[in-house]
Image (cartoon, rainbow, N blue to C red):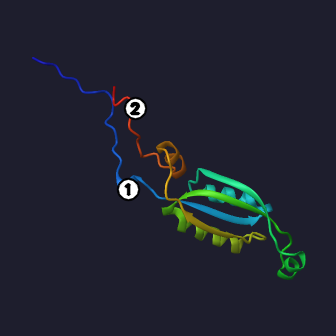
Amino acid sequence: MALTTSSSKPAKKKKTGSDIKKLKLLITIVPRKKTEFFVDFIGGFEVNFQSVLLGEGTARSETLHMLGLEDSEKGVIISVIREDKSEEILRGLDEKFHSVKRAKGIAFTIPLTSVIGVTLYRFLSNNKSIVSEDKTNGK
């Protein structure tokens, strides 16, 4: 009589097309004093990577005064977002641009066509369901 045992390791999940999410680069330009507010707001959409650059507008002070803008110091927020969340994030930003005092800004996305490395992709997409192949092939 032969005794068989089942493996104690759980079966590997296979990649499915639905696990792969396209990514976009979200560029958001806001008044510098509101940068932290918008970084926190965007982060609430499961965004794992954001970088902030300091910018300076090019309009003359007379033009800024005429338009009712106080300063030209800007925060440029670069975020990597999942494409399936881009409309929701842009709608939320638009609402904040209109409802938060002194928080006018612009936002746009650029599609990312490739990312090298499964681990990097998993981090950027906040996708925990993709399992990379085991380097030891189950050994």
Q: Quadrant of residue 59?
A: bottom right
Q: Crowdedness of circle 1 by 10 Å Cα count: few (<14), some, many (20+)?
A: few
Q: Nearer the viewer, residue 119 or 127?
A: 119
Give the mark, 2 or 1, whose residue is nearer the N terminus: 1
Q: SS for tag 1?
A: helix
Residue 5 in percent (x, y) is at 22, 23
Residue 9 in percent (x, y) is at 33, 30
Q: SS for tag 2?
A: loop
Q: Residue furthest right?
A: 62
Question: At x 85% / y 77%, what residue is drawn?
Answer: 64
For the residues bearing labels 2 and 1, Cβ distance under 8 angstroms: no
Left or right position of 108 against 6: right
Report the disc number at residue 135.
Answer: 2
Q: Residue furthest left?
A: 1
Give the vertical position of 109 relative to 66 (above or below).
above
Q: Nearer the viewer, residue 91 or 118?
A: 118
Question: At x 34% / y 25%, what residue is drawn?
Answer: 139
Q: Residue furthest bottom?
A: 66
Q: CA distance from mark 2 to mark 1?
A: 24 Å
Give the vertical position of 138 relative to 68 (above or below).
above
Residue 102 in percent (x, y) is at 78, 70
Left or right position of 3 against 138: left
Left or right position of 18 against 109: left
The amino acid type found where label 2 is placed reads Lys
Q: Crowdedness of circle 2 by 10 Å Cα count: few (<14), some, many (20+)?
A: few
Report the disc number at residue 67.
Answer: none
Residue identifier under label 1: 18
Question: At x 45% / y 56%, what residue is drawn?
Answer: 21
The amino acid type found where label 1 is placed reads Ser
